[in-house]
Amino acid sequence: MTKIVIAADSFKGSATSQEVATYLTRGIKQVAPTAQVEAVPIADGGEGTVTSVLTAVGGQVMTTPIQGPLGQPMTAHWGLLADHVAILEVAEGAGITQVSRDQLDPLATTSYGVGQVIQAALDAGATTLYLGLGGSATNDGGVGLAQALGARFYDDQHALIDQTGAAVGNIRTIDLSQLDARLADTQIIGLTDVANPLTGQQGASAVFGPQKGATPAVVAQLDAGLVNLQHLCQTQLGTDWGAVPGAGAAGGIGFGLLAFLGGRLEPGIQEILRLTHLAEKIATADLVISGEGQIDGQSLMGKAPIGIARLAKQQDKPVILVAGSVGKDLAAVYAAGVDLVLSSTMAPMSVARAIAQTPELLAQAGMTAMRAFLLGK
């Protein structure tokens, strides 16, 4: 019996990782009704990371009341695994999807809720925390997160600053003396698929600020605030993490994990592949199918499908990638170990139409992938 492992990232705005696998399976079964298909939901640190890990290895879905990115009361979901391990997402504590489009404003948002989720994980006995750094609505350098865990940030009048991105530029003194003491004995690993530094033209504000509602003037203000924060950490804490790849992830939360919580940053997809035991599942597969919304040369930069393809090639397994759209430099994608790239959109159509037809288009892609595999055999 043919065994197929489907480990695809989400098609953002169209389908979750689990839905992608369901639709692809539908097409595969039309060609090979007896094929055994195992779906392993995948995320690289963004939305869906908690679901991906819990689906693969089991664990408890936990809920925590938090203060959302605009201060609104919300409930965050996270996962508690075996061996005192927790899996969390910035998207659940300070997510861009938690703010309506007309209210997006990184000067007004805070990562405070992420700190509240971390505190809840500590209360539940977690001693290793994985935090997915994707999908944030914030640009506060992790200051809000640290405030929730006991850190104090003061302005030039020695008054506590507000919990907003705008207030970061007003910080003059950092006090970590009241930080939750349990953090000293806790491993905190930030999962990121970006390598941006904290500040500058490739920093958090310039690259990701506009997606969160920042105008050019606001980008400049936010970047100046993060420059101030980085300088204070150098002079008052004796640390300089601003240039570390990934420090600019999630509006600088990557930096905050390093500077305030003693954490570290890791490529999201590599840790997710390890946590989900994907290598063991691939070992018994005849074919591996992965994919995401768009496949091109940029997919080589830490994206999930390429990480999965490389893992599969270590075991000499054929790999097919399915994408909503296929971009430039596919030669580099094939050189990374991919055997075939398929686009689910086979005719010109609008984005809205493609999204509406996602189930049918992915089922058709699954059918084509299976026929290509059988042809190869």
Image (spheres, rainbow, N blue to C red):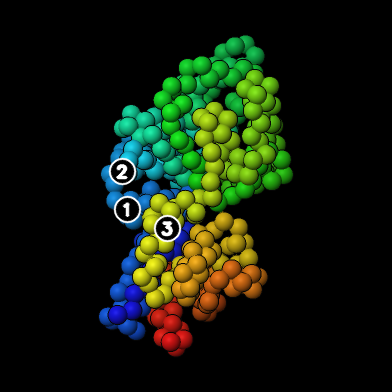
The residue that label 1 is drawn on is: 57
Label 1 CA crowd tier, 10 Å (few <14, some 14–19, many 20+):
few
Which residue sits at x=58%, y=17%? 154
Circle nearer the N terminus (1, 3): 3
Residue 145 left/right relative to 220: left
Q: Secondary structure at mark 3?
A: loop
The residue that label 3 is drawn on is: 42
Foreground mark, 3 or 2? 2
Foreground residue, 269 or 62?
269
Q: Quadrant of the C terminus?
A: bottom left
Label 2 CA crowd tier, 10 Å (few <14, some 14–19, many 20+):
few
In three-dimensional space, the C-alpha distance between marks 1 and 3, rounded to whole angstroms, equals 12 Å
Circle 1/circle 2 CB separation < 8 Å: yes
Label 3 CA crowd tier, 10 Å (few <14, some 14–19, many 20+):
many
Residue 243 left/right relative to 163: right
Q: Quadrant of residue 139?
A: top right
Q: How many marks?
A: 3
Circle nearer the N terminus (1, 2): 1
In three-dimensional space, the C-alpha distance between marks 3 and 2, rounded to whole angstroms, equals 19 Å
Residue 117 left/right relative to 35: right
Foreground residue, 104 or 117?
117
The amino acid at mark 2 is Ala
Circle nearer the N terminus (3, 2): 3
The residue that label 2 is drawn on is: 82
The amino acid at mark 3 is Ile
Q: Secondary structure at mark 1?
A: helix
